[in-house]
Image (tube, helix red, strand yellow):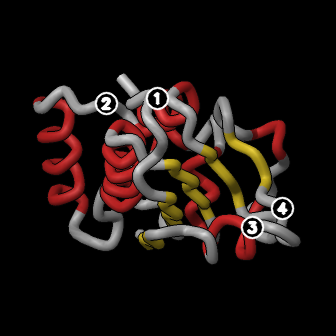
């Protein structure tokens, strides 16, 4: 349950990866901070925009730069732990009031439009994003 009191902090989280472990860490951090009462904006740039693609989010993998069996072992352990999926976390963040933004440069660069987005994701406004989100944040976290 999200705290009904005034948010304790404004938090900006940037995720520049589409590797599942990085995306998962960014999303879990965002959800934990949101549930502790913080105002959370999570921005996906570079390859991170793939995590917002409704047809790609469920196919993200862990450790793609490692031997295949290592990544598969991590994925199996995540399933055994019954962790939520990246899509589940994005939906929780959306419904719990976090802002989910995509980089306006990287969306077309990766062949996407807002029609490809998961629920709640929007393209960031480049004229206000840094001034109104990043510079106003009490914490800026990068994944």
Between 45 and 95, which is closer to the camera in this rendering? 95
Q: Earlier in the sequence, mark 2 or mark 4?
A: 2
Q: Report which residue position mark 2 lands on.
A: 84
Q: Report which residue position mark 3 lands on.
A: 129
Local packing at callout 2 (Cα closer than 10 Å; few below 14, some 14-19, many 20+) is: some
Residue 48 image offset from top left, x and y in percent: 56, 62
Q: Residue at x 60, y 60 (%)?
A: 43
Q: Are marks 3 and 4 in contact (CB under 8 Å)?
A: yes
Label 2: which secondary element: loop
Q: Report which residue position mark 1 lands on.
A: 92
| Cα gap from disc 3 to disc 4, whole angstroms | 6 Å
Q: Earlier in the sequence, mark 1 or mark 4?
A: 1
Q: Can you name the residue that lies furthest to the front here?
A: 6
| Cα gap from disc 3 to disc 1, whole angstroms | 22 Å
Q: Report which residue position mark 4 lands on.
A: 125
| Cα gap from disc 2 to disc 1, whole angstroms | 10 Å
Q: Nearer the viewer, mark 2 or mark 1?
A: 1
In which quadrant is the N terminus drawn? top left
Residue 71 image offset from top left, x and y in percent: 23, 56
Above or below, 18 against 142 in this view is above
Tell me if I can see residue 58 in this picture: no
Local packing at callout 1 (Cα closer than 10 Å; few below 14, some 14-19, many 20+) is: some
Q: Nearer the viewer, mark 2 or mark 3?
A: 3
Above or below, 15 against 31 in this view is below
Q: Are marks 3 and 1 in contact (CB under 8 Å)?
A: no
Between 64 and 119, which is closer to the camera in this rendering? 119
């Amino acid at each position: 349950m999200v705290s009904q009191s005034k948010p304790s902090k404004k938090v900006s989280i940037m995720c520049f990866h589409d590797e599942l472990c990085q995306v998962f860490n960014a999303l879990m951090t965002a959800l934990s901070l949101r549930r502790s009462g913080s105002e959370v904006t999570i921005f996906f740039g570079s390859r991170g925009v793939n995590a917002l693609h409704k047809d790609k989010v469920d196919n993200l993998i862990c450790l793609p730069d490692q031997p295949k069996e290592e990544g598969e072992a991590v994925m199996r352990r995540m399933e055994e732990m019954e962790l939520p999926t990246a899509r589940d976390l994005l939906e929780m963040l959306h419904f719990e009031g976090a802002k989910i933004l995509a980089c306006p440069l990287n969306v077309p660069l990766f062949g996407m439009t807002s029609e490809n987005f998961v629920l709640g994701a929007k393209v960031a406004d480049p004229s206000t994003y840094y001034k109104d989100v990043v510079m106003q944040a009490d914490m800026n976290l990068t994944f």
